[in-house]
Amino acid sequence: MIPQDTNDEDVSLFDAEEDTGKRSKKNIKHPVASFFHLFFRVSATLVYLLCELVSGSFIASMVTIILLLSCDFWTVKNITGRLMVGLRWWNQVDDDGKSRWVFESRKGTGKQQASDSESRIFWLGLIVCPVIWGIFAFSTLFSFKIKWMPVVIMGLVLQGANLYGYVRCKVGAKTSLKNMATNYFGRQFLKQKEFK
């Protein structure tokens, strides 16, 4: 099991966007990042769906899908998360060989905030695509197309890892996802009791 970082120090996100600004409601401040956030994800999905119609080569299709998924993983992890929502995560190996996970979020009101539109684009793409790859995994398994299973698992793992990393950044590295879900359902239960 990999130990996880529990420090909550406020680390600057590359000092790239330190200028002050109010949260924009509708403007997309980073259109290129928004485009590539969705481009690689949608392209990998479309190539997977259409590869048997367009190309008869399994190897070419598999390599294309894995390259698109890898480009998506790198782009989302290193660029679009930082620019669009002010979050980033990575794994760091200490001198003694221990691996630790670092989760950061942009804090404070003085730093530039992401727009609501970019935030919606980011989270929608981040959540919907792993669900789609999960559906692909079940359909591949039940249709007995086992040769596609490694590709589908790769899509699920890469996009699921980004989703997990950014959810941990959003809710905080100290908060366990189980505790967060328990608190959420507890609040929902109490709200229902109040209305009755």
Image (cartoon, rainbow, N blue to C red):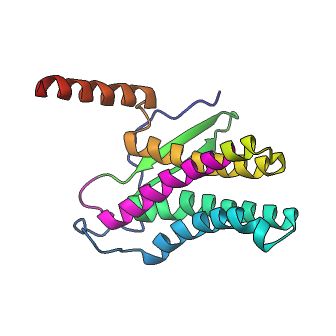
The structure residue drawn at horizontal position 64% and vertical position 47%, both measured from the top left corner, is 156
Residue 54 place in picture, x, y as percent: 77, 73
Residue furthest bottom as drawn: 32
Residue 147 in sight here: yes
The structure residue drawn at horizontal position 42% and vertical position 68%, both measured from the top left corner, is 16
Residue furthest front as drawn: 143
Q: How many marks?
A: 0
Residue 14 in sight here: no
Residue 144 place in picture, x, y as percent: 80, 44
In the image, taking residue 63 as reference, residue 79 lies left or right, namely left
Check the image and report above or below for 1 versus 152.
above
Magenta region: which residues?
108-137
Residue 164 place in picture, x, y as percent: 52, 43
In the image, taking residue 135 as reference, residue 196 lies left or right, namely left
Residue 136 place in picture, x, y as percent: 66, 49
- Please tell me which residue lies in front, 163 or 48: 48
The quadrant in which the C terminus is found is top left
- Please tell me which residue lies in front, 81 or 37: 37
Check the image and report above or below for 22 versus 94.
below
Q: Is residue 134 magenta?
A: yes
The structure residue drawn at horizontal position 49% and vertical position 64%, both measured from the top left corner, is 80
In the image, taking residue 167 as reference, residue 135 lies left or right, namely right
Is the stretch drawn in magenta largely helix, strand or loop?
A: helix
The quadrant in which the N terminus is found is top right
Q: Is residue 83 magenta?
A: no
